[in-house]
Amino acid sequence: DVYKRQLLYNASNTNLLFVHGTSDKVVPVIHSRRTRNELKKLGYNFDYVELAGHRHMLDLRETGALMPGIVGWMAKQRRNPHPKRVRHRAMGKYMLESFWVRLDKVRMPNAQVDARILPGNRISLSTKKVDKMTIYIDEKLLNVKRPITIEANGSQVFSGKVQLSGVTLVESWWEREDQDLIYRGKVEVDLTKTQAKKR
């Protein structure tokens, strides 16, 4: 599905392993090869394994031949909960957040953001079809004791100190229930007015 394949854009900070049998008649291997090529084009890290002669039903039982390799791969993976760059594409009214970025009002289809933390306590946003968004302040990446500047599509939309709040902390926990993605500060960005509001 070409439409859903656009979600590959969201895999920039995800460790990926995919395995496909070359004799799969249910889902031909060409689909995994296409995914591999798209991920390469995006510059993302992934591991891709083709199993010569294997069909659709791979032996993924706990005692199966493939499982030691899969478990070994998984044991080496570590998520970086504080990426300096977040790329995210929304396909509907769900899945609107990624790490320290949340899309609040978007125009479908293909709303997207490429957000970067830059030196000097700066955040750069490149957006398409995004009207409003929230930037959570990741204190592992930004110094909350100093002013923070946010630019969106070449225009400054915020500059100043961000107020820290227990309400924001609870909100960020409630949205994801992930102890590594809890934030005390946020900036709500209105891209329709190219201004931002501190909270």
Image (tube, rainbow, N blue to C red):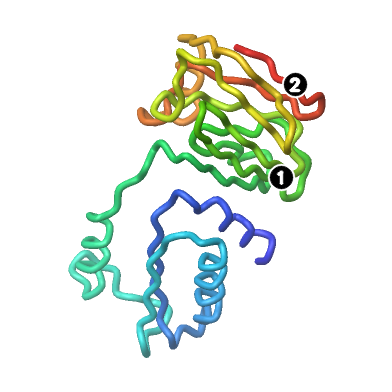
Give the residue type at disc 1: Ala
The picture places residue 25, in percent across and down from the top left corner, at 50, 85
Crowd rating for badge 2 (residues with CA inside 10 Å; few <14, some 14–19, many 20+): some
Q: Quadrant of residue 158?
A: top right
- Judge depth for marks 2 and 1 and give the one in front: 2
The picture places residue 90, in percent across and down from the top left corner, at 65, 45
Residue farthest right in this picture = 193
The span from disc 2 to disc 1 (Cα, nearest Å) is 19 Å
> Looking at the image, which residue is at 42% across and 23% down?
139
Q: Which residue is mark 2?
A: 195
Crowd rating for badge 1 (residues with CA inside 10 Å; few <14, some 14–19, many 20+): many
Query: Circle 2 sits in a helix, a strand or a loop, which is it?
Result: strand
Q: Nearer the viewer, residue 141 or 121?
A: 121
- Quarter placement of the N terminus: bottom right
> Looking at the image, which residue is at 74% across and 44% down?
128
- Quarter placement of the C terminus: top right
Horizontal side of residue 35 vs 21, given as left or right: right
Give the residue type at disc 2: Gln
Position above or below: 113 against 61? above
Position above or below: 126 against 163? below
Q: Which mark is residue 123?
A: none
Q: Which residue is mark 1?
A: 111
Position above or below: 83 against 1? above
Q: Earlier in the sequence, mark 2 or mark 1?
A: 1
Query: Circle 1 sits in a helix, a strand or a loop, which is it?
Result: strand
The picture places residue 53, in percent across and down from the top left corner, at 37, 90
All told, the count of numbered labels is 2
Q: Quadrant of residue 4?
A: bottom right
> Looking at the image, which residue is at 67% across and 48% down?
91
Q: Nearer the viewer, residue 135 or 141?
A: 141
The picture places residue 125, in percent across and down from the top left corner, at 64, 37
